[in-house]
Amino acid sequence: MRSFFILVLSVLLLAYPQGPAPASASGIDIAFHQPIYINSDQGFTAANGVIAGNGTAANPYIIEGWNISGTKVWTSAAHRTNYLIALVRTAPKEEDRHAGMTQFIVDLSHSGVSVRPIYNLYGGHDFNEVVFDGFFAADDMVMGDVGMGWKLVTSELAFERSGPDRFLSTYRLLVESIRAIGADPDARSANEIGRFVAHLATLRRMSTSVAGMLERGAQPMVEAALVKDMGTAFEREIPETFRHLIATEPALGDGASYAELLGMTMLRAPGFTLRGGTREILRGVIARGLGLR
């Protein structure tokens, strides 16, 4: 069994991203590695869960720029963010509800925008409400062209839904669980560990395949939706499986012990299949892409 254990750890190390944090073109580090970053959450205002029902509006100033007012709820990590990307309506609604929407880069250090915390059930602070009240955005802060915001958003979703953060949220628990079981697992534990490692390697290949398609200029919306649907299901299954395999009472805390790591992961796991598009939305995207609806 020791050779099995070494093989598993080798595959896990290959699956996990290594090396220093990549930097964006502006010199601001990406969120995954540093506390200062450009937020990956687009500034959607989702009315009744429908992104296209955007209620954040922008009106042109006499000088070159826009006056933005409205609210964006459930903005991840906005309290640790210097900039975010906001999707706002810049023209009256038409029959095509996706028309007349524009993306802006928002500097949160400027006046007219505030971040309010939203605390979850265990007191953690991950989400926020971002309120725009007469925020001025200059024309040079427009991303792409005015009115093309929805097209940009749909292309960005492929990046958001297919990245490693959609299947590595419970990676640390997977590694620590394998360590806790040890080098001589029983048959059931060995089966579950092997299954998870095989799934992880497959998801990594799927994710890098979508990245290659994006680099070539393709629009792999269905493929990205598949990565997220399968990846977040994988993330949620890990704590549920190992809590039955390892006799540990889950606890709350910062994750310093295995009990705390398991407990906090169990609390956070339900959100994995919600962020970036719910499971139902993703499966609708997949079904349409396959011509099933």
Image (cartoon, grey):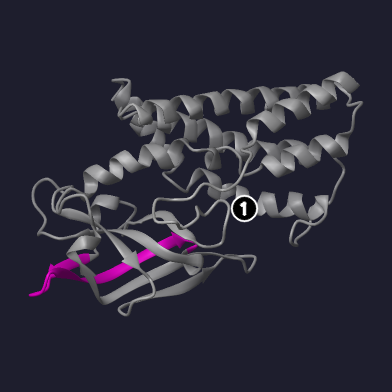
Q: Quadrant of residue 135?
A: bottom left
The image quadrant where one finds the N terminus is top right
Residue 245 is at least partly visible in this image: no
- Could you say where residue 185 lies in the image, as x and y percent from the top left? 88, 26
- Could you say where residue 196 lies in the image, as x and y percent from the top left? 69, 28
Which residue is at 46% across, 35% downward?
162
User: As displayed, is residue 58 above or below residue 52?
Assistant: below
For the residue pair 146 and 199, the one nearer the viewer reads as 146
Residue reaching furthest to the bottom: 111
Q: Which residue is mark 1?
A: 268
Asked if residue 279 is among those painted magenta in the image, a careful observer would answer no
Left or right: where 191 falls relative to 91: right
Left or right: where 85 falls relative to 62: right
User: As displayed, is residue 197 above or below residue 55?
Assistant: above
What residue type is disc 1 on?
Answer: Arg
Q: Main secondary structure of the magenta part?
A: strand
Residue 58 is at least partly visible in this image: yes
Label 1 CA crowd tier, 10 Å (few <14, some 14–19, many 20+): some
Q: Give, as a single range, the part of the protein colored magenta.
A: 57-77
**How many callouts does the rendering have?**
1
For the residue pair 119 and 200, the one nearer the viewer reads as 200
